[in-house]
Amino acid sequence: MQRQHLAILYGAFILLSVSSGLFAQQTAEDALDTQNASLKTSADVQKRINALDDDTRDLLNDFRSTMAQVEDLSAYNDQLEQLVATQRVEIADYERQFQEIEITKRRILPLIVRMIEVLEEFVSIDIPYLESERGLRIAELKKLMKRPEVPTSEKYRRVTEAYQIELEYGHTIEAYEGEMTFQNETRTVAFLRFGRLGLYYMTLDGLEIGYWDNSRDDWVVLDDEFRQPLDRAIRIARKQLPPDLIRLPIPAPENRT
């Protein structure tokens, strides 16, 4: 009986041991599964953390790049503001200059007109050389003043150019052919202009010579003794002979008011 009880206890012990072993094995497997699941979860979390870290880094880089662009734009805007301010000053200066130019135009146009009038008056009382050429020059200046599309600067330049030409007449000698009217007779003669001191003529046949007398406002016939000197002077002016001293009568200067 006692052996029977021992056998039963032994069997129960073996069953308990087997059950305990199975339970322990199951518990270990569950722990491993839990650990593996935890590791996988940790790995997933780490991946997310890494992904978030990369996103954060990218966002930080984008932010830094954006801020750098903002600083560049701010500096560029500052430069533009300075440029605009400078241009405003320049525009104001240009407007002031334009106003001054307009004022100058209003003042200089009457001056140019008066210069043409004075030039015309001067030519009318001067010795009568190159009358057609000089008269045409003055007529062209008058036409020029009536053309609004021509700049004031060009009008002024042309008038001063005409004055310069007249000024040069006083420092040169010139021989040319032209028409003259004397004693109600018009004929072609050879003229000699000696600066503005004297204007002489010789008929093409060389038989008559004379000079312009401002005091008489007419031509005066010269004696034959001046024929050869006048002929030589004409040749010198035409560069047919070398320069030389010539004896010719010169009218006394006259003041006209």
Image: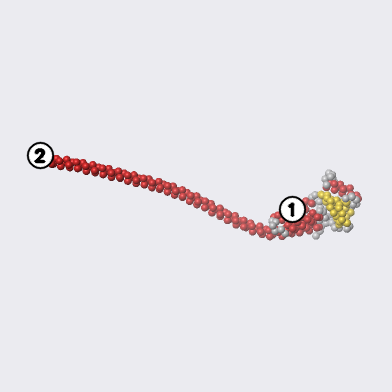
Q: Which residue is mark 2?
A: 3
User: Is any part of residue 11 visible from this angle?
Assistant: yes
Q: Nearer the viewer, residue 189 or 163?
A: 189
What distance separates the C-alpha of mark 2 from that of mark 1?
A: 157 Å
Along the viewing direction, whichever of 169 and 73 lies nearer the viewer: 73
Residue 251 visible: no
Q: Of 86 and 28, which appears nearest the observer?
A: 28
Q: Residues within 10 Å of mark 1 (few under 14, many from 20)?
A: few
Pointer 1 residue: 161
Amino acid type of the residue tagged 2 in the rendering? Arg
Q: Secondary structure at mark 1?
A: helix
Quarter-wise, where is residue 13 in the image?
top left
Q: Which residue: 31% across, 44% down?
A: 39
Q: Position of residue 219 (x, y in %)?
A: 87, 55
Residue 100's x, y, as percent?
Answer: 65, 58
Residue placed furthest toward the left = 1
* Quadrant location of the N terminus in the rendered image: top left
Residue 256's quadrant in the figure?
Answer: bottom right
* Circle nearer the N terminus (2, 1): 2
Residue at 75% over, 54% down: 162
15 vs 194, left or right, is left
Which of the labelled discs sits on residue 181, or is there none?
A: none
- Closest to the camera, between mark 2 and mark 1, is 2
